[in-house]
């Protein structure tokens, strides 16, 4: 392994470890929520803005968001297919939570730090552009899916709150940073042409983005999780199909830059999104009188919490191996290995169920 890459990997692991050691300091209610809010509302938007204004606006403005959307729909279909393999029919609330969480991506909390550290700011700008497609799916698509799902189950014709949803999208700091950065880049403005005081202020905020994100992962890490083996198998299956999709993307799209290749490999390995969990919470709040929650919040929360360290470890393997995982053949092997472990879990589960049925 390249010593410089090893040094970066150890540094990132130490930041996660520091976050885990600081976990007792964040035991107060809403303390981690405050940290997450600062990351998503200030540190991450500042980093994305600085990278976006430097992007070449003549390249991949449609391809990158379209690729992210393809990843989302691909995982949605496979999530629906995987659900009956790992969950019993009686666990309908868990199944609905799994289907909603499985295709959601949170590159901001997992992929962005690695892209920035190992590929550079140009790669981060490409990742931010691709994330625009993912945001459309997660913030709008999954919300509509959850809303219509519960409305249908209640045999109601509930109206989607389009105005409220539109306000939410327009006021989210990350979206504002992307749009503003793209507008300035289109006008030919960048860090060299903007007022130096403004750029320096944004740069100081952006400096804390990567360490805060990785420390947040450490703080959120839980060693004892609900049904950990089941969720680990699900995440392995998710990673496996992600590797196979990355291989297909590289073969079909034939990227000519290291930034694009890294993005195609890393994006499908992003952790599950917090927004999908928020959708499940909101839907359950609409029908509090039900005998059973429409979405199993405990299962969704455990899946989100476990997906973050799982994604970080997977991305560490990818980027610490230099460009080993940029080859389609190696991605196929990794995908088949992860899927093999997933199928072994499924087979063991079915055998256990059949054994106890006797």
Image (cartoon, rainbow, N blue to C red):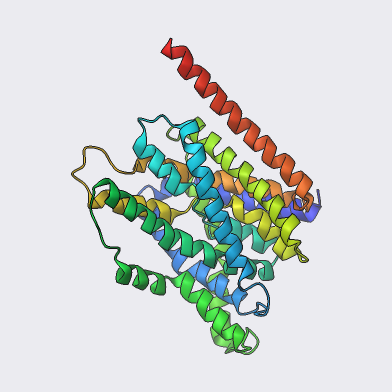
| Quarter of the figure with the C terminus | top left
Total number of numbered discs in the rendering: 0
Q: Nearer the viewer, residue 106 or 151?
A: 151
**Residue 231 placement, left or right of 293:** right
Q: Residue at x 38, y 54 (%)?
A: 145
Q: Nearer the viewer, residue 346 or 299?
A: 346
Q: Nearer the viewer, residue 204 or 251?
A: 251
Q: Eyeballing the image, is 75 above or below 174?
A: above
On the image, the x and y values in percent for residue 221 come to 49, 44
Which residue sits furthest left?
289
On the image, the x and y values in percent for residue 196 come to 59, 87
Q: Residue at x 62, y 31 (%)?
A: 341
Q: Nearer the viewer, residue 124 or 208?
A: 124
Which residue sits furthest top?
358
Q: Residue at x 76, y 61 (%)?
A: 254
On the image, the x and y values in percent for residue 63 come to 63, 68
Q: Residue 185, located in which quarter of the rendered image?
A: bottom right
On the image, the x and y values in percent for residue 232 come to 53, 36
Q: Eyeballing the image, is 135 above or below 50?
A: above
Q: Residue at x 60, y 48 (%)?
A: 312
Q: Eyeballing the image, is 197 above or below 314?
A: below
Residue 183 can be seen, yes or no: yes
Residue 39 can be seen, yes or no: no
Q: Residue 190, located in which quarter of the rendered image?
A: bottom right
């Amino acid at each position: 392994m390249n010593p410089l890459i090893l040094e970066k990997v150890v540094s990132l692991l130490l930041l996660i470890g520091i976050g885990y050691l600081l976990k007792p300091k964040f035991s107060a209610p809403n303390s981690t929520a405050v940290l997450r809010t600062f990351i998503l509302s200030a540190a991450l938007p500042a980093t994305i803005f600085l990278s976006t204004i430097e992007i070449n606006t003549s390249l991949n403005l449609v391809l990158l968001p379209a690729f992210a959307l393809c990843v989302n729909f691909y995982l949605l279909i496979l999530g629906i297919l995987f659900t009956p393999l790992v969950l019993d029919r009686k666990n309908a609330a868990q199944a609905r939570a799994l289907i909603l969480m499985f295709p959601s991506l949170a590159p901001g909390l997992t992929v962005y730090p690695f892209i920035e550290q190992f590929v550079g700011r140009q790669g981060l700008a490409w990742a931010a552009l691709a994330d625009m497609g993912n945001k459309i799916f997660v913030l709008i698509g999954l919300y509509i899916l959850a809303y219509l799902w519960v409305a249908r189950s209640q045999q109601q014709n509930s109206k989607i709150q389009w105005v409220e949803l539109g306000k939410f999208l327009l006021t989210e700091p990350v979206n504002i940073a992307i749009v503003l950065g793209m507008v300035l880049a289109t006008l030919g403005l960048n860090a060299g042409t903007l007022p130096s005081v403004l750029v320096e202020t944004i740069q100081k905020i952006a400096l804390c983005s990567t360490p805060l994100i990785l420390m947040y992962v450490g703080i959120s890490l839980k060693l004892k999780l609900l049904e950990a083996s089941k969720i680990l198998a699900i995440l392995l299956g998710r990673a496996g199909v992600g590797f196979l999709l990355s291989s297909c993307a590289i073969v079909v799209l034939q990227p000519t830059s290291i930034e694009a290749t890294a993005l195609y490999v890393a994006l499908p390995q992003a952790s599950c999104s917090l927004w999908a969990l928020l959708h499940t919470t909101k839907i359950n709040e609409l029908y509090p009188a039900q005998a059973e929650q429409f979405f199993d919040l405990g299962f969704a929360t455990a899946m989100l919490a476990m997906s973050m360290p799982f994604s970080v470890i997977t991305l560490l393997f990818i980027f610490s191996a230099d460009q080993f995982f940029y080859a389609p053949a190696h991605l196929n092997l990794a995908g088949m290995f992860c899927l093999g472990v997933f199928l072994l879990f499924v087979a063991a589960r079915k055998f256990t169920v059949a054994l106890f049925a006797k």
